[in-house]
Image (cartoon, helix red, strand yellow):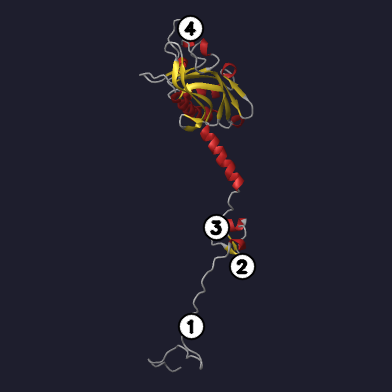
Amino acid sequence: MAALAPEQSLRPEARPGTVSAVRVTPALPVRALPSSARIAPTSEDLALHTAGVAPVIASAGTIRSPRPAARPPSVVQKAMAKRMARRRGSVCGDLAIQGKEIGGVPGPGACGISDAVAVTSVSGVALSQPAQIDCRTAKTLKRWINRAAKPAIGETGGGLARLQVAAHYSCRSRNSQPGAKLSEHAKGRAIDISGFVLNNGTSLSVLEDWAGRRGPVLHAIHRRACGIFGTVLGPNSDVHHRDHFHFDTARYRAGSYCR
């Protein structure tokens, strides 16, 4: 075969009657489909959207949007109503603490609470009776429920549902003993818990279960309260607390007093 001359080209010649240049047709503008032409996304579409794939064009020319449908107005209204009710029932500036503001509770001598609340539930855990305490004690109770009581019980019986309140505000001396110092109960800074009720109805009693097979759970609840409350007393402290835990927010220079 003869060698090609330098000026020869390997490019084929254009056919007669045609142009060598290619004419590019401009892209048509994309027009959004009306909302009435769109259909709800399928599970496949949502999976593609999650994987970063563009929406699918349906055979009828409609677009299956990967965006989930908006909640019905009735659902939104119920959620808002529930939130507003919870806000109205909150005390101490904390939505997790539900109850009623009482204000000043007068008492003889040094008894009384300057700004009391009647707490009915904390962090979704109901109280068997409204507890009249001050806000510092209410917030400390919340911290103990979240950090000690709930973790110690875990998912046993469906979790913690209610606290059995044995005592709250009461103008009396310590352990109601004549001549003893004034109790923290008399200042709205204490609460006594005698038991715990789980979501399945099971009850844990300080009196009956402290030394039984359920004892380790109660021991953990009691032990973890130390450092959260100022005073923590239980069945091992004295005969007066054999059937309940005493928690108060008294402050000591040496730290929490726990027995």
Left or right of residue 154: residue 6: left
Q: Amino acid at mark 1?
A: Arg
Q: Amino acid at mark 3?
A: His
Q: Position of residue 133 (x, y in %)?
A: 48, 21
* Callout 2 secondary element: loop
Q: Residues within 10 Å of mark 1 (few under 14, many from 20)?
A: few
| Residue 141 visible within the image | yes
Q: Earlier in the sequence, mark 3 or mark 4?
A: 3
- The image's mark for residue 177 is 4
Write down the residue under mark 1: 23
Which residue is more in the foreground, 55 or 29?
29
| Residue 228 visible within the image | no
Q: CA distance from mark 1 to mark 4?
A: 105 Å
Q: Are marks 4 and 2 in contact (CB under 8 Å)?
A: no
Left or right of residue 109: residue 64: right
- The image's mark for residue 49 is 3
Q: CA distance from mark 3 to mark 4?
A: 71 Å
- The image's mark for residue 61 is 2
